[in-house]
Amino acid sequence: MLTTIIIFIIILGILVFVHEFGHFIVAKKSGMVVEEFGFGFPPRIIGLQKVDGKWKWVWGKSLRNELPPTPSLEKRGGQQPTIYSINAIPLGGFVRILGENNEYQNHPGSFINKGFWPRFFTLVAGVLMNVILAWVLLSVGFGIGIPTAIQSASELPPQATFYDQHPGIAEVTINTPAEKAGMKPEDSILSIDDKDFKQIPDIQNYIQSHPGQPLNFKILRGSQTISLSIIPEASAEGKGLIGVGLATFGKLKYPWALTFTEGAKSTGVALVNIVLGLYHVIHDRIGLAAIGGPVKIAALVGQARQAGVAALLSLTVMLSLSLAVLNILPIPALDGGRVLFLIIEKLRGKKNNQKVEQAFNTLGFALLLVLMVIVTVHDIIRR
């Protein structure tokens, strides 16, 4: 359990840190004053700041404007020395940009005082970094072998290697014998009635030929071997059905020369699937059952840890892309919400009412916190 929590914190820290690094680097290149770029969340443990060519230690809790604008600021091209800090709560990172909350409108290095495009790219840079991270991780995964499920051998690219193959469960239909017995997606089928099956058609034929008869499934779930007794229901044709979709699970590997190209393709496909999944959650009003918070993600990390490094890498890819998609949604307080206000400002041809914009962002942040609490409580109850 402790190992799972540590891995969960590391993954979350990497995702958030990479996201914030995107904001940081673009803001710097755009001439904005970056007050602090921190690893973890305050209170601050220690920091470094380069003042007049010399690095100085910064101690104590995080305070805004610890080095206020001075006459020498103009000599540094409008840039104020950034504090690079290590903080006590190791759950990612943050970047503080002068004027990010629409203050300091007269300061040349303030976020609010920059043009449309510098602000736009600063806001979307975090999302882009999460997509790039997923691309790089997928590319590495394809080089070492990444967990994949296929329905037939015809799906495999000719240049790829598919190894460690075994039949498993791709999906489980609700209110079916398999679901009631506790079978779950990604379970591997080791045997049925002590008989080994290597091919999916052989498994299907065996189940269909035993309607109404109890079958003893030996399942591998992570590192655990589980026995499940399932009685197939008889279909209209008299065939046994348990309510699962089967697939062949294994590891997909490409030659290193092709990994980044294939990684880019798979990143695009994964992004589309996440967007479509989010659409169905909203359009079909699936509700909390389809949403997971920190508790559910930690559980997924535990399952992936048991399956190995490649499975952890795959999970990190999906979490990184999910973070990118959620952050670009036009919801106040998120990057997408701030981009929306920026576009409104561009269309109006004048600055938005900063008090109104800040009020929307504050309300959006509060609602997101409430949603996070509800989802977390729901996850705990379900467990």
Image: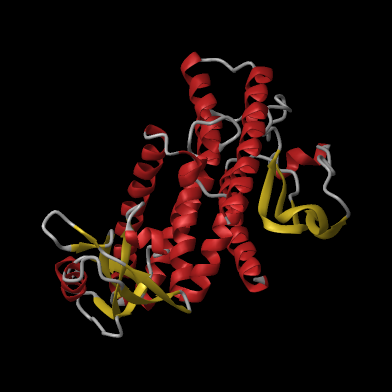
In the rendered image of this protein, does residue 346 appear above or below residue 109? Answer: above
Relative side of 371 to 127, left or right: right
Instruction: Depth check: give the residue in front, 298 or 112.
Output: 298
Report the number of discs.
0
Residue at the image point whose x is 51% and y is 15% from the top: 349
The quadrant in which the N terminus is found is bottom right
Residue 346 % position (x, y): 49, 21
Relative side of 190 to 126, left or right: left
Instruction: Depth check: give the residue in front, 371 or 366.
Output: 371
User: Which quadrant would residue 148 be assigned to in this image?
Assistant: bottom left
Instruction: Depth check: give the residue in front, 37 or 153.
Output: 153
User: Which quadrant would residue 149 be assigned to in this image?
Assistant: bottom left
Residue at the image point whose x is 15% and y is 63% from the top: 239
Q: Residue furthest right?
A: 60
Q: Residue furthest front?
A: 212
Residue 5 % position (x, y): 65, 66
Residue at the image point whose x is 26% and y is 77% from the top: 162
Relative side of 62 to 160, left or right: right
In the rendered image of this protein, does residue 137 appear above or below residue 80? Answer: below
User: Which quadrant would residue 277 be assigned to in this image?
Assistant: top left
Q: How is the image coloured?
A: secondary structure
Instruction: Depth check: give the residue in front, 40 or 318.
Output: 318
In the rendered image of this protein, does residue 263 appear above or below residue 271? Answer: below
Residue at the image point whose x is 55% and y is 34% from the top: 119
